[in-house]
Amino acid sequence: MSQALPQISLIVPTLNEAENLEPLAQRIAAALAGREYEILIVDDNSRDQTPEICVRLAEQYPLRLMVRQRPTNGLSGAVMHGMAGARGEILVVMDADLQHPPEKIPELIEKLERSEADFVVGSRYTAGGSMQQEWGLSRRVNSWVATLLARPFAGAVSDPMSGFFALRRATYERALRLTPLGYKIGLELICKCRVKRVSEVPIHFATRQRGESKLTVKQQFKYLEHLSRLYDFCFPRLSPILKFLIVTATSWFVGWGVYLSMLRLKIGPAAAPSIAYLGAIAVTAVFHLRYVRTQREFIMRPRPWMDFWFTSLAEWAVCSLTAVYAAARLDNPWDVEIFLISFGLATVMRYIMRKEFLQDVRGLRRDVRLEELAEVGSEDAMRNAGRFKDDHAGNVRK
C-alpha cells in the first residue's frame, strides 16, 4: 500500500453498514487501479462491526476510519467531517450501501481533470441513467417536486439530490456558510460553493442488498428545512417576504374559520375577531417553533420566545381594538369587512414588530452584519457569529 499523498479522497459516510464495506472497498480498488487514493469511512458511531472490519480492510486498502462519537447534522455533517480530514485534491462523496456504482468514479474524476465542470454528479435521471427498483407513483411525484423546489439554485441539474458527486478541493474551499442538514449535502455544496458548471454522469442506481435504508419521513422534512436555508442564502431579500406571506396566509385561513364559527355561535363581530386572532397566533407559533428549533444558533436575539409573545400580544390588542371600533363606528358593516380591517391592521403590526425583533420567519442571512449584532447587544449571537467564522476558517485550513 503506497504512502504517497493521495490524489483522490473518497468520503463514505456510514451508519451500521458493516456488511457493505468489504465489497465496496474491493470495487473502489478495481475502479481506481493505478491511481493514488484514500477511502475515508466517516462513521456515526455504528453499533455493528464497522470498526473491526475497517481495521482489517486498512491492512489491504488505503482506508481510514473516522468515528464521530457525537454525530450532528446527519449524513451531511459526516460528509463535512470527512472533507475536513481529506488529503486529496479531488473529493468524491458516495454512499456505503453499494447503490452508487464505484465503477463510475473515474468518469466523475475525468470531467474535473479535463476542466469540463466544477462539480460532477452521478445522476439517475440524466440520459443513460437508470434505477434498478421501480418507484411507485407517490415516490416519483415526491422526487419530481423535490427537484422542482431545488431548481432556483440547482439550475437544470436533473438529480440535484444525488449523494454521489465529485469536486475539487479548491471548489470546496471557497464555500460560504456551510450549514449541512439531513442528506442533501451535494445540493448545499452546489449552492454555497457558487458552482457555475455542473456536469452529470449517468449511473445505474442499484437496489440496496444489505442493511437498512436511512431515508425516513423525518429526513424528508429535514430536506424542506434545508431548502428553506438555501432560499434564504440565495435570495436574502425575497425569501423572508415570501415566508412572511406564507405564514400570514395560513394564519388568516385558520383565523377566518374560527371567525365564522364564532359568528355561528352568535358572538358579535366586535368580539369574534379577538377570539379568531388567537387561532392565527397559534398557527404563527408553530412556524416560530420550527424557526427557533432549526435556526437557533443564527438567531441574533437572546430570547426569541419572549419577543414572539410580546409581538403577538401587540397584534392581538390591535386586532381587538380595531374590531370594536369598526363595529361601533361603521354604518352596518359586513362581517367580512370587520374581519379584513381588524386582521389587516394586526398584520401590519406583526410586520413592524417582527422587523424590530429580527423575527422574519427565516434562517440565515447572506452576511451576518456585526454592526447589527452590536446594536442588538446579544453576547450569545456574537459568540455564534464568531464561532461560525472560526469553524469555516478551520474547515478551509484543513
Image: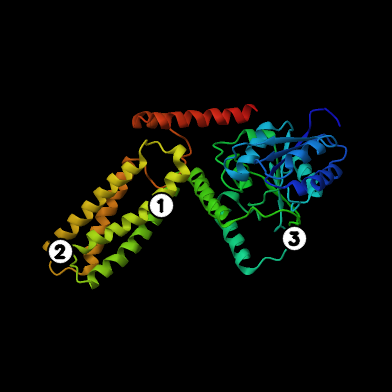
x then y, percent, for residue 65: 73, 36
Mark 2 near mark 1, Cβ–Cβ under 8 Å? no
Q: Secondary structure at mark 1?
A: helix
Which quadrant would residue 383 be assigned to in this image? top left
Residue designated by label 1: 287
The three-letter code of the residue at mark 1 reads Phe
The three-letter code of the residue at mark 2 reads Ala
From this viewpoint, is residue 61 visible?
A: yes
Q: Above or below — where is 106 with respect to 246?
A: above
Which quadrant would residue 178 be assigned to in this image? top right
The C terminus is located in which quarter?
top right
- Per the rendering, the mark at residue 327 is 2
Q: Earlier in the sequence, mark 3 or mark 1?
A: 3
x then y, percent, for residue 208: 73, 56
Q: Above or below — where is 77 with respect to 217?
A: above
* In front: label 3 or label 1: 1
Mark 3 near mark 2, Cβ–Cβ under 8 Å? no
- Give the crowd class for mark 1: few <14, some 14-19, many >=20 residues within 10 Å: some
Q: Secondary structure at mark 3?
A: strand
Residue 338 placement, left or right of 120:
left
Q: Secondary structure at mark 2?
A: helix
Separation of disc 3 and disc 1 at Cα? Answer: 38 Å
Q: Residue at x 82, y 34 (%)?
A: 36
Mark 3 near mark 1, Cβ–Cβ under 8 Å? no
From this viewpoint, is residue 171 visible?
A: no
Residue designated by label 3: 130
The N terminus is located in which quarter?
top right
Separation of disc 2 and disc 1 at Cα? Answer: 31 Å
